[in-house]
Image: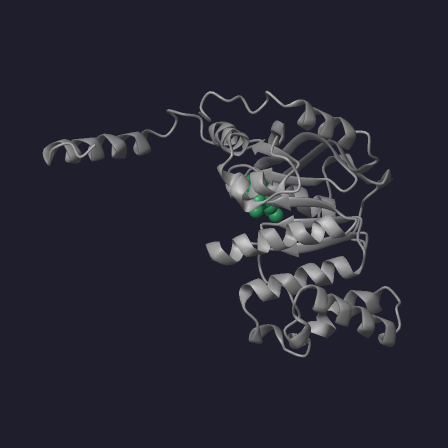
Amino acid sequence: MSEQLDYRRQSEAVKDRFDRLKQRPVTLEVKGLTKQFQTHDGQLITALNQIDLKVYKREFVCVIGPSGCGKSTLIRILAGLESATSGEVLLDGKPVSKPGPERGMVFQAYTLFPWLTVKQNIMFGLIESGQSKFTAEAEARQWAELIGLGKFENHYPDQLSGGMKQRVAIARALANQPKILLMDEPFGALDAQTRARMQAYLMEIWKNIDVTVFFITHDLDEAVYLADRVLVLKANPGEVEELIEVPVPQPRHPEQALSDEFLATKLHIERLIHPPGQDEEEHLNLVNMVNIASDVGSIL
Ligand code: ADP
Ligand code: MG
């Protein structure tokens, strides 16, 4: 079934969706981006090599790739927290060189200010950007309601679950009305059920808010479920392996994870990241299991 289905064999509706997507304005453009690090012993590591990418307005792009392929380095450069060795990053055509309110960040680690309440955490950026305390408070209240934490607006982060903390982090990032939301494995530390709820919840927010999302994950299901397109990176040096148009129709529903398009896309990405036959140890384990099964008689 999904083995035979080529994820690239797009239906007319899917082709049309991506044709229309590419006619939108470009929100983020990455041009020939290269980043090298010098290690303690003087060695030069090329974390990212000649990355080119265009992300369109209100698009949802997921980035996936093996550990160490430069995902976090890429998002930190987009955020302006790190500088590129060469190449450039443009947001709405303007070069990015330092952090700015038009880019909201959400990290895997919980980054709320522990000494501030939910409401004060959300207000923080609004006051920084010059809003009065009165307006910032009213807006923060609305956000707390929107993320279902109205009753918790006066709670402190350590009184919240991991999922709730990340909801506040998303609200805090979105309250500044960024053009793009940059997320580095934001649900990576959550249990599977909470993560699934957070994904559905992020999709719901994205449907209703005019924001482009750039989302790093190491979870294949998460990437295919959330993304319009998935950027697959390879390691040593970090380069673009493929940019995949996910043929699963939008808006997404969890049941689509069982569809042929979903499974075929997932399988394709899995093979890009873990080419078959590359991992000898996994292969040996499988042989052992077959032997054990034949000792006790076939149960298949
Ligand atoms: P990922 O997020 O995909 O796991 P990273 O972006 O964290 O990968 O790292 C990419 C590569 O760059 C790795 O080899 C890592 O060791 C190296 N690297 C990242 N940050 C630094 C740094 N500040 N100094 C030296 N090397 C770094
Ligand atoms: Mg990382």
* Image height of 206 relative to 236, above or below: below
- Which residue is depicted at the point 59% across and 51% down? 199
Q: Is residue 277 left or right of residue 70?
A: left
Where is residue 14 drawn, in percent x and y? 67, 28
Name the residue nearer the viewer: 165 or 49.
Answer: 165
Residue 180 visible in the displayed image? yes
- Which residue is depicted at the point 57% across and 72% down? 160
Quarter of the rendered image showing ligand 1: top right
* Figure quadrant of residue 139: bottom right
* Figure quadrant of residue 71: top right
Where is residue 151 drawn, in percent x and y? 65, 76
* Image height of 252 relative to 262, above or below: below
- Which residue is depicted at the point 31% across and 33% down? 281
Name the residue nearer the viewer: 179 or 144.
Answer: 144
Where is residue 300 drawn, in percent x and y? 21, 32
- Which residue is depicted at the point 80% across and 74% down? 137
Query: Number of callouts in the render?
Result: 0
Residue 190 visible in the displayed image? no
Name the quarter where the N terminus is drawn: top left
Name the residue nearer the viewer: 219 or 279.
Answer: 219
* Image height of 82 relative to 22, above or below: below
Q: How is the image coloured?
A: one colour
Which residue sits furthest bottom?
A: 154
* Figure quadrant of residue 49: top right
Q: Is residue 269 left or right of residue 207?
A: left
Where is residue 28 drawn, in percent x and y? 78, 39
